Amino acid sequence: MPLPIGSKIGPYEIVAPIGAGGMGEVYRARDARLGREVALKVLPESFSRDAERLRRFEQEARAVAALNHPNILAIHDIGESGGAPFLVSELLEGHSLRKELDSGPVPTRRAVDYGTQLANGLAAAHDKGIVHRDLKPENVFVCADGRIKILDFGLAKLAKPAMSAEERVTQGASMQETTPGIVLGTVGYMSPEQVRGEPADARSDIFALGTILYEMFSGQRAFRRDTSAETMTAILKEDPPEITTAGKPIAPALERIVRRCLEKKPLQRFQSARDLAFNLEGLSGSTSTTAVSDVVAAIETKDDEKSHSWLIPAAGLLLLLAGGAAGWVLHRGGSNAVPSFQQLTFDRGLVYSARFGADGRTIYYSASWNGQPIQIYSTDPESPESRPLNLVNSSLFAVTGSQMAISQGCQDRFIGACQGTLATVPIAGGAPRPLAEDALDAEWTADGSEMAVIRQMNGKYHLELPRGTVLYESGNWLSYMRISPNGKYIAFADMVSVDGDAGGVVVVDRAGKVILRTPIFVSFEGLAWSASGDEVWVGVTTTHAGWADTIVGISLSGKQREVYRVPGMLRLHDVTRDGRVLFSRESWRTGTLFRGPHDAKDRDLSWLDYPVGRDISADGSMVAFDDWGAAAGSSSLAYVRKTDGSPAVKLGPWWLPVLSPDGQWVFAVNGTSVANGELYLVPVGAGETRSAGGNKLLQTAALGWMPDGKSVYFLGNLGDGWHVWLQDLAGGAARSITPPVSPKQGYSETHLVSPDAKLVFARDTNDKAMLYPLDGGEARAIPGWQPEDIWITWSADGKSAYIFHDEKKFAPVYRLDLQTGKRELVNTIIVADPAGVTSIQAVRVTPDGKSYVYSYSREQSDLFVVEGVH
């Protein structure tokens, strides 16, 4: 019996009835305590007779009340009066979405807005583990100000279904929470899993929202048939017709979103309501020219609330934006058409590798975002968010129908290139299965029946297909391996060195015969077979300077053509059989930071895009650095700069500049011909550059000055292995001052000679740290030396050395006693912003330990899909 006007339930006075339904009677009521009007719902008597249902009702009501989201009906109170439980919520003014749909389709702009609000409300609830289970237009309220409210949230799983020929189906005498075999929901808006009586989760709500979106856009229900049984069969087995409004198809972007919501399998839908909300919100903000066209089409759809007069400037603005986005592409060979592209990732960090999934839509990639460890993610072009797959410290090698090949314990070989344990792991989840150690790459044949792998073994790099059968061997690092679609050929990069990206393309057949070998590209970043399979596409630079900026197609006969070019840098990851291209736009930079004895924090001394600090004067007043990035072009540029922040002084095309003891000269390598070992003395101020001699040795690094400034030393190879050589600046030939040593000292070590000029630091051929007497006496090992130690310089008294560890995001600096091996931590260098930081390099410390300069690498990527490239 309805409650009479003026009667009270607790502190609430009934003002007027609002409506009644299966979930009880609703009244307008007045809260005498707070002087406000509320909506009061008196729930059915069945609730009071079922203690378990009542308990769950109270639990759910409290959970929903805690959401406090603008798109969910706010619950103020729950209680019981006369044996009947009641619920108090905010009082809404407006109408249900059903009433609006009774008049036909909702204008597109308004429907997108409603859908976005609904998705945001669902996302907030799902985050708290609350699923609606009965989302339908009757449970969506449109407020007078256009705000959407979701009603009866969390109550659906508590409601005992009642028989209705059109709307509800009952199976079983009682309703238990998520009981298998029970059909729960409203026919026409239920998900397939609900129809089958299976447990419903957040993705069931997404399906229901898809049916509402379909109905708002088209004015027709997605799955309405003559009987409930036929409707449920359609939900399980049929797709709804193409969405049309006023006889015209809606924008393709909207159609794709709705279809994604209505996928029969939960795994193929949006995996979160937040993903759906972002897709709806982002239609007009997409970088895809196709998506921009979709938005223009959506705006031009008839809207009964606004005049058409504003459409021309708005559409013009969007087309202008599309033109600006298209202008990002400088050139595309073979066609005047402009490809469309869409950005997939938005975090700050480095994408290591990426592949399309077997469905051609899902994208899997490995990345280190925002300073966190590398791990593997999945994403979708229709979703701006990525989902981590709980594979931390792993990088992606390849993807086949149901599994991924990954590198566990990824060790960086070069930027984004990993070496580790090859393992396979199911895409659906599960523990990785290790297969092989020291793997650098892996790839499946198109049918997933065989796997190729690149491994490092006994100092060589092997390409194996199948795994264990060597088809190609090289002393060079091999990378970017891909098998042709027909399975006949394997293409890969044969790189020049392990610490650079210069390399050439090699293609071999299944017998290991070399079919193609190209000249070396200065920058080689990625490889994939073309959609047709008759070309190898590579990310390279076609000039002699800079980073890879062009996708080049290379036929098996060696003919090359330019496919696609962008400003800046790219890395090619994958190409689908329908021609979509997956690549990342790269930004690779280094920074150089300095701190003196009176500085509270590091000071930025960066210059251009790739400065690497090579030296610091003994008093900490000047640093020398070089730059070999895009700004420098095809040669290295050397600079000196005062640490007070004065502008840098360009010295010219030199590499590895090291300051003389008096600061008047730098000892450097010819930056235009580093392979020829041409050593020079370059004046910091006025003066003439002159040759430093050195027999034009093939040298690698470790340049330095003797303490008296009259001689220089360097690491070089004259044909019988690497030695440290001494060159008298007065003339004469260079002479070896060590036996054969390891060339692995790299570019980060200098100041090798002790202050008294009696000892020189170097690693022997077994990479053991040694001190060699310059007079030819017996060498001695450095006690306490660890394999990860990197030499910086001698201390001022010559009794200790400063060393550091490159821990990628930070670098501990130690003082190592050269007699006892005792080490003392003197500093920890940390890059304040760790996003994209991949290494700490070239740490330089003054002999007194009071000042230092260091450089760090920051590599950042944005992942894109491009369509229309041929």
Image (cartoon, rainbow, N blue to C red):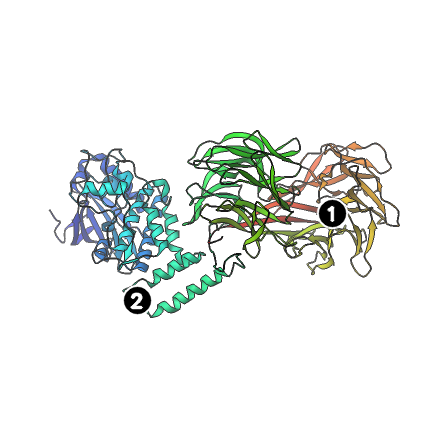
The residue type indicated by label 1 comes to Ala
Question: 506 and 488: which one is in front?
Answer: 488
**Residue highlighted by disc 2:** 306
Classify residue 408 as left or right of residue 271.
Answer: right
Residue 106 position, x and y percent, is 27, 58
Mark number displayed over residue 675: 1
Identify the residue shown where x is 45% and y is 65%: 320
Q: Are marks 1 and 2 in contact (CB under 8 Å)?
A: no
Mark 1 or 2: in front is 1
**Mark 2 neighbour density, 10 Å: few (under 14) some (14–19) many (20 or more):** few
Indicate whether 637 appears above or below 22: below
Pinpoint residue 849: horizontal percent, then vertical percent: 72, 46
Please state which amino acid type lies under the numbered disc 2: Lys
**Does residue 522 show up?**
yes
Residue 76 pos. (x, y %): 27, 49
Residue at left offset 71%, top offset 32%: 784
Disc ID at residue 64: none
- Asked if residue 501 lies left or right of residue 257, the reply is right
Q: CA distance from mark 1 to mark 2?
A: 69 Å
